[in-house]
Amino acid sequence: MASGSAYPPSLLNRFSFLLGKLYFRALDAEADELSSLHVSVKQQAALTVLADEGPMTQHELGRRLGIDRTTVVGVVDGLDGDGLVERRRSPTDRRAYLLTLTPAGRDTQEQGRQRVAEAEHRFLGALGESDRARLRELLARALGDG
Amino acid sequence: MASGSAYPPSLLNRFSFLLGKLYFRALDAEADELSSLHVSVKQQAALTVLADEGPMTQHELGRRLGIDRTTVVGVVDGLDGDGLVERRRSPTDRRAYLLTLTPAGRDTQEQGRQRVAEAEHRFLGALGESDRARLRELLARALGDG
DNA sequence: GCTGATAATCAGAAACACTGAGTATCTCGA
DNA sequence: TCGAGATACTCAGTGTTTCTGATTATCAGC
C-alpha cells in the first residue's frame, strides 16, 4: 500500500507549507517545459514583461519582476547572448539601456507562453478548470493589488 | 500617486509568480513572528510534526518535512542546543535517534503555533475568513493527497 | 560647473541545500 | 555465526542563488 498522505496534517494546514510545495512544483514544471527553448523561468518572465509593456530599462524590468538589480544583469546577459533581446542605449538617458525584444525574442516569448500554460495544466492537474480559475483569483487577491 | 499595480498583469496570471510572491511573503511574516521565540520556520515546522506525531527518527522527520537528511542535522542541532528536543537513542535501533520534545519544546511549539496563525492572518489580510479557508482547501487539493 | 542621485556592472560574501564519503549499526541469508 | 549489503547519522566540501558594496558613467538641480 502506498498508504495515506506523505505530509503531516499539521503542515497541510499551514499556508507557507502549501504555498512552498506548490511553488517549487510549479517552478520545476515550468523549467522542464521551457528547457527545450533554452530559456529559464526568469528569462521567460522577462520576455513576457517586455512583450507586454514594450522596451524598458533594466532597473524598471527588475522592479516589475521583483528581482535585484544585480540579478537582472545575469538574466539579460543570457537573453542578449542568445539574441532574444537587445541592449539599446536610451536616447534620453545614456546611463540606461532600453531592453528591446528581437523578432527571435518575440517568437520565443510566444512559444514560452504556451509552454508555461502547459506546465500549469500539468502541475495543477488535480484541479478542474473552474477551480484553477478560482485559485488564480484568490492568489491574486491575496497578493493585493499593490 | 502610488498608482496601480506594481506587478505586470501578464505575471499576475502566472501561477508560479503568484505562488512565489505569496510564499516568500508568508515566510517573511512567519520568520518575523517567530523571531522572538528564537526558532526558525523550519524549526517550528519540526516541533509541530513532533508534537503531533510523537517521537521519530531524523530520517523520518526529514521525510515528513520534505527536506534533505543532511539539512535535518542542522535543524535538530539548533533545537537540541536550545533544549527544545532531545536526541535519545532508539531502544530498537542504535543507529537512530528518537527525537523527543522536551517540556520547553512543547511550550515553544504551542506559542509558535499561535504566532504562525497570526502571521497568516497578517499576510492574508486582504482575504476574508471564508476566502482563506477556500484558498487553503484549493491549495491542499492542488498538492494532491499524496 | 559643483553636488548628490541614479543606471549598469562586477567582485566578493552570505545563505542555502545537496553530494559523497565515513562510521556505526542493522537485516538477511547461507 | 559470519559476511554482504542496506540504513541512520554526521561532516567536509561543492554548487547555486542572491545580495552587499564599490566603481564608472551619466543625469538633474542649483
Image (cartoon, coloured by chain):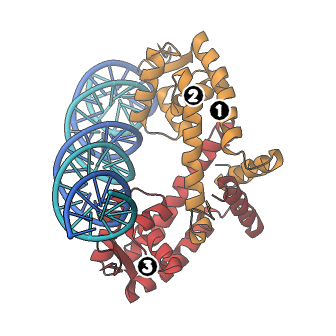
Chain colours: A orange, B red, C cyan, D blue
Q: Which amino acid does label 1 sit on?
A: Val
Same chain under badges 3 and 2? The reply is: no
Label 1, label 3: how many angstroms apart (C-alpha)?
A: 42 Å
Q: Which image quadrant is residue B122 in? A: bottom right
The chain containing the residue under callout 1 comes to A
Relative depth, front residue between B46 and B12 = B46
Q: Where is residue B79 in the image (x, y as percent from the top left)?
A: 34, 74
Foreground label between 1 and 3: 3
Q: Position of residue A100 (x, y in %)?
A: 55, 17
Horizontal relation, residue B110 to residue A4: left or right: left
Q: Which amino acid does label 2 sit on?
A: Leu
Label at residue A126: none
Residue indicated by mark 2: A34
Residue indicated by mark 3: B55
Q: What element carries label 3?
A: loop
On screen, residue A123 above or below D26 = below
On screen, residue B51 above or below B67 = below
Whether residue A96 is visible to the viewer of this picture, yes or no, is no
Same chain under badges 1 and 3? The reply is: no
Horizontal relation, residue B22 to residue B57: left or right: right
Relative depth, front residue between B80 and A84 = B80
**Do the CB atoms of the residues marked 1 and 3 lie less than 8 Å apart?**
no
Same chain under badges 1 and 2? The reply is: yes
Relative depth, front residue between B14 and B2 = B14
Horizontal relation, residue A48 to residue B113: left or right: right
Q: Which image quadrant is residue B67 in? A: bottom left
**Do the CB atoms of the residues marked 1 and 2 lie less than 8 Å apart?**
yes
Residue plotted at (46% across, 24% down): A76
Label 1, label 2: how many angstroms apart (C-alpha)?
A: 7 Å
Residue indicated by mark 1: A116
Relative depth, front residue between A125 and A145 = A125
